[in-house]
Image: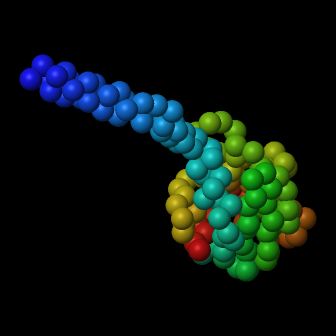
Amino acid sequence: MKHIIHSIVTLALLGFTVLQFSFCGKDDPPPAPEPTEAERVTALLTAGNWPLTSVTVEGENAAEIFKDFSITFTNTGYTTTGTTPVWKRSGTWAFTDATATKFRRDDNVEVTIESINETSLKLVLFWEQELTEPGRTNALRGRHEFTLTK
């Protein structure tokens, strides 16, 4: 009887030891860190071309000034199409802080990202430069709100 109890205890200990060693070295890798806000917004910005849905200047419809406008972002640059009196054909940009709600273009214009998701983007900028074309100087000065939708 002692021999049977001793065998059962030995087998139990051996089983426990094998079970314990079977988990050694199999630590799950740490979870991937959550993306920063700048990484999240950059991924949304760079996920394709953003065609213009509407644009206002000081609250007035300005669609006729931005015919066929669209913008495509890369991690540090952008390109535009269509009529773009307040956007260069191409340039660079960088976030101004970690909240990723504003970026500065290489022409020193600050652009606010009012909203962004997978299909909709709203950008706001203030344009203070004068153009030489008569009649358009006042029409282009002020707050520009761009709504772009994929």
The extreme left residue here reads: 1
Rendered view: 15 above or below 135? above
Q: Position of residue 110 (x, y in %)?
A: 72, 46
**Quadrant for the N terminus in the image:** top left
Which of 10 and 57 lies nearest the eye of the viewer?
A: 10
**Residue at coordinates 61% horizontally, 69% vertically from top-left?**
148
Rendered view: 95 above or below 66? above
Rendered view: 77 above or below 70? above
**Quadrant for the C terminus in the image:** bottom right
Colouring chosen for the image of the structure: rainbow
The answer to whether residue 31 is left or right of residue 94 is left
Which of 148 and 124 lies nearest the eye of the viewer?
A: 148
The extreme right residue here reads: 132
Q: Position of residue 65 (x, y in %)?
A: 74, 75
Which of 83 and 79 lies nearest the eye of the viewer?
A: 79
Rendered view: 42 above or below 86? above
**Residue at coordinates 54% horizontally, 65% vertically from top-left?**
118
Corner quadrant of residue 96: top right
**Residue at coordinates 76% horizontally, 58% vertically from top-left?**
74
Q: Is residue 124 visible?
A: no
Q: Is residue 72 visible?
A: yes
Task: Please tell me how many numbered marks the rendered image carries.
Answer: 0
Q: Position of residue 57 (x, y in %)?
A: 65, 64
Which of 66 and 27 lies nearest the eye of the viewer?
A: 27
**Residue at coordinates 51% horizontally, 33% vertically from top-left?**
25
Corner quadrant of residue 83: bottom right
Q: Position of residue 77 (x, y in %)?
A: 80, 56
Corner quadrant of residue 52: bottom right
The answer to whether residue 97 is left or right of residue 94 is left
